[in-house]
Amino acid sequence: MLWERVSDILQLQQLEFTVEEKQILKNISLTINEGKFIGIIGPNGSGKTTMLKIVYRHLKQTSGSVTLHEKEIWDIPPKKLAQQMAVVSQDSPVLFDFTVKELVMMGRTPYKKWLSTDNSEDFNIVEKSMKLANVFHLADCTLNNLSGGEKKRVMLARALAQQTNILVLDEPTNHLDIEHQLNLMDLVKDLPITIIAALHDLNLAAAFCDEVIVMNDGTVYMQGTPQQVLTKQTLEEVFRVQVGVSTNPYTNKIHLYYYT
């Protein structure tokens, strides 16, 4: 393993976010316990990405709090927070054309002192991270020469190199074909850490998540296991589509199908 497991409790309490007099998030309170794979689902515009951006401090809430170990995240020094939480966002712009290995090595930055050099431990962690994310063979390639899916996996490798105990993923399977979607989900499912992922594909949420948070119109509509949450009634009310709920005969997990 790349890291040791520790207890993490992330709490959102009465979280609200307003921009230009439009309320995006409304009174969100929830607790995420250590070691769970949490999926966040909801229609477009339901507030999934906004909530995640507040969790990893890309945005600041209008009111309420986000705490990690009962400490407000804005009171945690940036380097210390980066040792506890890694992020793979929908779009991770890179201003310079680094090689894959150089970019993944940036995941070690939170552990570096000013002007310190990379050591054998850093190189070992970066190599393992690239292998886990299936980009080791791309180590010497530059980002501009990679596909969208390859770039996504490189950003995952960089996050793995941070050795954090919380990994936040915003639509991690975007730009990935089916094979790489399943490989990525298998990878993060097996990590001994807390995963918080906004997911578009409800069947991936059903197959891989321990708990699912359903968001609708800026609020938490429901939270529970996939069996509790992914019901015909809930999905038709929130997503406004006709849906059937069955069982995948190969995995015994919930499988959803849609019809008009």
Image: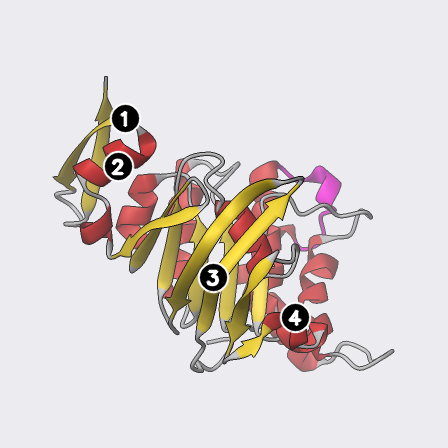
The residue type indicated by label 1 comes to Val
Circles 1, 3 touching at the beta carbon (< 8 Å): no
Q: Which of marks 4 and 3 is in front?
A: 3
Residue most extreme to the right: 115
Mark linked to residue 132 = none
Residue 238 rendering spot, x and y as whole percentages: 31, 36
Circles 2, 1 touching at the beta carbon (< 8 Å): yes
**How are the colours assigned in the image?**
secondary structure
The residue type indicated by label 2 comes to Leu
- For disc 2, the neighbor class at 10 Å (few under 14, some 14 to 19, many from 20) is many
The residue depicted at 39 percent of the width and 63 percent of the height is 30
Q: Nearer the viewer, mark 1 or mark 4?
A: 4
Tell me which segment is drawn in magenta: 139-147
Q: Please give left or right for residue 171 compared with residue 205 in the image.
A: right
The tag earlier along the polypeptide, 2 or 4, is: 4
> Label 3, on which residue?
14
The residue type indicated by label 3 comes to Gln
Mark linked to residue 235 = 2
- For disc 1, the neighbor class at 10 Å (few under 14, some 14 to 19, many from 20) is few
